[in-house]
Image: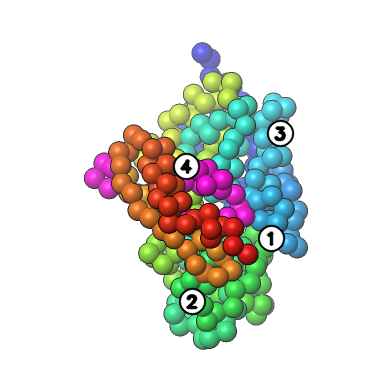
Amino acid sequence: MNAPARVVIATRESPLALWQAEHVRGLLTGRHAGLQVELLGMTTLGDRILDRPLSTEGGKGLFVKELELALLERNAHLAVHSLKDVPMHLEPEFSLTAVLAREDPRDCMVSNHFPTLDDLPDGSRVGTSSLRRELMLRARFPRLKIASVRGNVGTRLAKLDNGEFDALVLAAAGLKRLGFAGRIRQIIATTVSLPAPGQGALGIEVRSDDNETSGLLAPFNDAETYAATAAERGVSRGLGGSCQMPLAAYAEVEHGALRLRALVGNAKTGEYVETEVRGPLSEPAALAAEAVERLLALGALRLLGAP
């Protein structure tokens, strides 16, 4: 099979998405001498909805549909995503061909006046775009006021700087990738805020029948991150996961095995159930199924159905 001479990457045009696409372009050109790699910038429906939570409009899959159309129409060979934005069920035309080594998967707090969440005064206004983080904040810090904040990282930081919020809770990986690590006041332990499935990882999507592009990308797949995120995504898939579900799942490789922690609850009340399972690195799907079974036995469906 001859390797292609030119590859086009479909990407959103937000600063973080462009960083991610440029990162993959650098990997490709660094490994495949002479390969021409171009970016096809696109604005997705998820980027255009800024006045209401994505959970009311169909979830984070709104960030990938236009990119997938570019793949189907053969205007692009691959799409680079924040893995936590990739729908848990891919259409058969598409394949998640590589997951890159993970950045920091944890949440973090950004504030101009306070060093940690514990230091925030009662009634402080904390911004987040995630139902999962809202659940965490209501469960751990019920004295704080939680409000939705939308927009890219720069927009959210500007809202903080303008005094609309006392603090923000964001993914640490995005801030670090964009050079905003200095804005982080607190890295939040996973025991306090369990990450979302796939958080901190980049996923590369191709057409299922595009073996040439898959071959180019194969060297960049990180087997441990792929297995860990497969387990996390399996939990979400098993519970019918979407952006409308306050769900966390985080797997770590320990001594050659997977340790998977998962949590689901009600973002309005802060009530949740959680579980932890361990199993072989080679069986992420089975591990996810065990975690889902335990969460259901603990009453996950009742919590998800509560008003």
Residue type pointed to by label 4: Gly
Provide residue 121's location: percent of width, then percent of height. 51, 86
Task: Say whether residue 244 is magenta.
Answer: yes
Q: Which residue, given by chain and number where applicable, does mark 4 sit on?
A: 234
Q: Please state, as top left, top right, bottom left or bottom right, where the C terminus lies in the image.
A: bottom right
Q: In the shown orientation, is residue 104 left or right of residue 40?
A: left
Q: Is residue 118 visible?
A: yes
Q: Is mark 4 on a helix, strand or loop?
A: helix
Q: In the image, is residue 220 above or below residue 179?
A: above
The residue that appears at 66% across and 56% down in the rendered structure is 55
- Range of residues picked out in magenta: 234-257
Most foreground residue, 54 or 20: 54
In space, the residues marked 1 and 4 are separated at their CA atoms by 24 Å
Q: Nearer the viewer, mark 3 or mark 1?
A: 1
Residue 69 bears which disc, if any?
3
In space, the residues marked 3 and 4 are separated at their CA atoms by 25 Å
In space, the residues marked 2 and 3 are separated at their CA atoms by 42 Å
Provide residue 119's location: percent of width, then percent of height. 45, 83
In space, the residues marked 4 and 2 are separated at their CA atoms by 29 Å
Residue type pointed to by label 3: Leu
